[in-house]
Image (cartoon, rainbow, N blue to C red):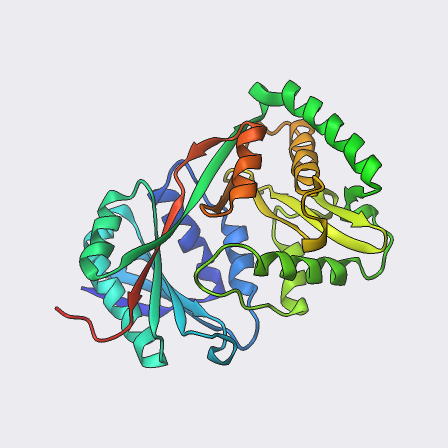
Amino acid sequence: MLSFRPATLDDAAIEADVVTALFPDEPLDPGIVRAWWKSHDPDDTVERFIALSDGRVAGKVGRFHPAWAKMPARYDRLSVLLFPDQLGALGEAFDHIEDRSRRDGAAIFTADAREDEQARIAFLAARGYREERRSRGWELDLRRHGATLREMAERSRARMREEKIAVHTIDRDPDPRRFRKLYEMSEEAAQDTPRTVPHVAQSFETFVKWFQTPGIHLDRTWIARDGDDVVGVSVLLYPPTRGNVWTDWTGTARRIRGRGVARALKLETVMQAIALGTERVRTENDGANAPILHLNAELGYVRIPGWIQFLAGAGPRTP
């Protein structure tokens, strides 16, 4: 039997340790998780619990949704992470967090599984969850493709000069409103990302907390400018203690798409990664985002397991 206690910020390391145990190929940095736990708007609903089995930590469960008033439908994202030797208690953990979500008024549960988690996928299907969408995971070997990437970067730089689009890191940008402009552009890009659960804009105050995440550096955050406007961004997350280097976010303004800006930004991030001695970088995109999937393939990325989103109605569960 599991028991549950409310999690505190100091418990963020537990989530990092569980994910690292579940996916040894994808270790997670505790400091990054702690930053994630701190980055929510005040009116978001966020609940986190530490699951205990005979007094020993079994994992972490939680749920998240923006304020119901901001959402066209009441989706609640559920998270159940148990250590490998505790996976037999998945049912108890889901019972606990689904019940809390149901009492909060959720209409639809969302849950995730990695593509190679066959037991978890089968568990969710048996519980009444259905697959909604898939993301695609990718990895790029920078040593193998270094020469080709350099040639592509030079061609991309030439095109940006022709387009009169400036590409540089945000720490070199003198505009005092650069973060506000980046926020507004990022929100526009996020609205256009394929998704089932609607995107709810976060506040500017929450957005700027992103730059306090360990592994996010201003001198590694690449932006594109078209005149006075910030029209694109791409940034890699460099875990300070453990984990793979991942693309944390790439987005462009609607009016600039088709002019090679996303390509230019991604190439600058990987060229910088090569200069820093990074051997591989990873990225993940929605499976319906055809332009970015095509770009990843062109750059030489190869597939790694992605994630599956599952949905279930939040009505009473049939035993």
Counting the numbered discs, the total is 0
Q: Nearer the viewer, residue 248 or 149?
A: 149
- Viewer-closest of 157 and 32: 157
Q: Quadrant of the N terminus?
A: bottom left
In this picture, residue 319 sits left or right of residue 265: left
Residue appearing at x 64%, y 33% in the figure: 270
74 in relation to 247, above or below: below
Residue 9 at x, y percent in the picture? 49, 64
Q: Is residue 134 above or below residue 42?
A: above
Q: Position of residue 158 (x, y in %)?
A: 80, 30
164 relative position to 97: left or right: right
For the residue pair 233 and 289, the one nearer the viewer reads as: 289
Which quadrant of the figure has residue 53?
bottom left
Judge whether residue 57 can be spotted in this image: no
- The residue sitting at 66% across, 37% down in the picture is 263
Give the quadrant of the C terminus: bottom left
The x, y position of residue 62, in whole percent, is 38, 65
Say if residue 295 shows up in the picture: yes
Q: Position of residue 40 (x, y in %)?
A: 55, 67
Say which residue appears at 53% left-offset and 77% top-offset: 43
Residue 70 in the figure: left or right of residue 97: right
Q: Is residue 82 above or below residue 296?
A: below
**Outermost left residue:** 319
Vertical comparison of 70 with 26: above or below: below
Q: Residue at x 26, y 63 (%)?
A: 93
